[in-house]
Image (spheres, rainbow, N blue to C red):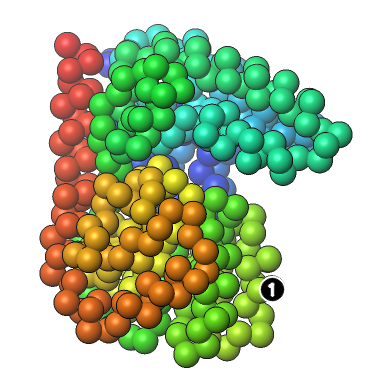
Amino acid sequence: MRQSPLILHDAFAFPGGGEKVAQSLAELTGGILWTAQFNQAAFPENFFASRPPMDMRAREKHPDLARLSETACFWKCFAQFPRSNPPYTIFSGSLAPMAHERVTGKKILYCHTPPRILYDQRDYYLSGQPATRRPAYKAFLWAFERAYAKAARSMDLIVSNSQNVAHRLGRYLQLDSEIVPPPVRTEDFTWLGQEDFYLSTARVDRLKRVETIVEAFLAMPDKRLVVVSGGSELERVQAMAAHAPNIEVRGWVSAQDLRQLTGKCLATVYIPRDEDFGISPVESMAAGKPVIGVAEGGLLETVQEYKTGILIQASPRPEHVVQAVSAMTPELALSMRAACEARATKFDESAFRAKMQRLIDGVLR
């Protein structure tokens, strides 16, 4: 009996962009999903159809290491992956490739980004460590960088999710890659009207700049903002908005609620630091809603200036967001609807599947 391919993804903690890619790859290939850690409660009932991921339960198997460093915990888990002989394996994420020596057959990396703590954001993350921990953290990053580079160079094919990520692979690892944008289920997002609020869907962590968006709306009490996501900075952002009646911070919401809010908002606001690709802006455009974005990273490849949104300058301050929100009137937003919907179709899941199947077939010849 022919063995199934394997799809290895770092962790399924929440239904984010990387998780959607891994699930879509499993559907496309009939592959078996494996992951270091699976939080089943965080996912909608039908997210995986009938094939949820195989959970290696890394934190439970390595509790002491997990308390010290989750990255190191997941690294060890994949390095001890059961020896397997699939026809091919697709690795999704930064730590799943650490299993590259445990599988035979062709190896494909779908690269969301080379680990940012190792490359373009290394100094940023180091600065967040207490001074007493920095020497040990630097040693850990040195070992992680060597291991990741070895894994990446062992691949038969590397696929980048954007030109931005392909550039990082070339700059930091001197590796070439094919570009296949991640799948977006554009049919899930539709125009449901235009209500008087702006929507932020970015994960609430240090690189997504949600606090900058909240600061901007604190200066605009006549403009409504709804923040729908969670993350490491959620409590801080909730505290910032605690006494602002025009700002609602909901945390994680269901997929149905996300579709409803996206379909009804006036526009979305999405200004992450050098985003890898960014699925949220495409979902926004699929619903006919323009994006107030930032002119850096993956948004330069998706949002068209003054056609499907407004791109503010790189490294934005709150006043730049204020200016863009003020410019994005209901009339302007409505005039962009058709262009937004047309633009989103270029990133539909069907395009992702066709491109990935062609590349997989090419590797297996």
Residue 291 placement, left or right of 118: left
Q: Position of residue 185 (x, y in %)?
A: 26, 54
Q: Residue at x 38, y 49 (%)?
A: 296
Q: Quadrant of the C terminus?
A: top left
Q: Nearer the viewer, residue 104 or 202?
A: 202
Q: Residue at x 41, y 30 (%)?
A: 168
Residue 327, relative to residue 169: is it above or below? below
Number of numbered discs overlaid on the protein picture: 1
Q: Nearer the viewer, residue 146 or 256?
A: 146
Find the residue positioned furthest to the right.
132
Q: Residue at x 35, y 37 (%)?
A: 164
Residue 91 placement, left or right of 36: left
When asked about the image quadrant of residue 147, the answer is top right
Q: Which residue is mark 1?
A: 239
What amino acid is found at the position of numbered circle 1 in the picture? Answer: Ala
Callout 1 crowding tier (Cα within 10 Å): few <14, some 14–19, many ≥20: few
Residue 353 shows up from this direction: yes
Residue 3, relative to residue 137: is it above or below? above
Q: Position of residue 181 (x, y in %)?
A: 27, 41
Q: Quadrant of the N terminus?
A: top left
Q: Position of residue 137 (x, y in %)?
A: 74, 29
Residue 258 shows up from this direction: no
Task: Look at the numbered disc 1 and give the secondary structure of its residue.
Answer: helix
Residue 362, relative to residue 222: is it above or below? above
Q: Residue at x 52, y 34 (%)?
A: 120
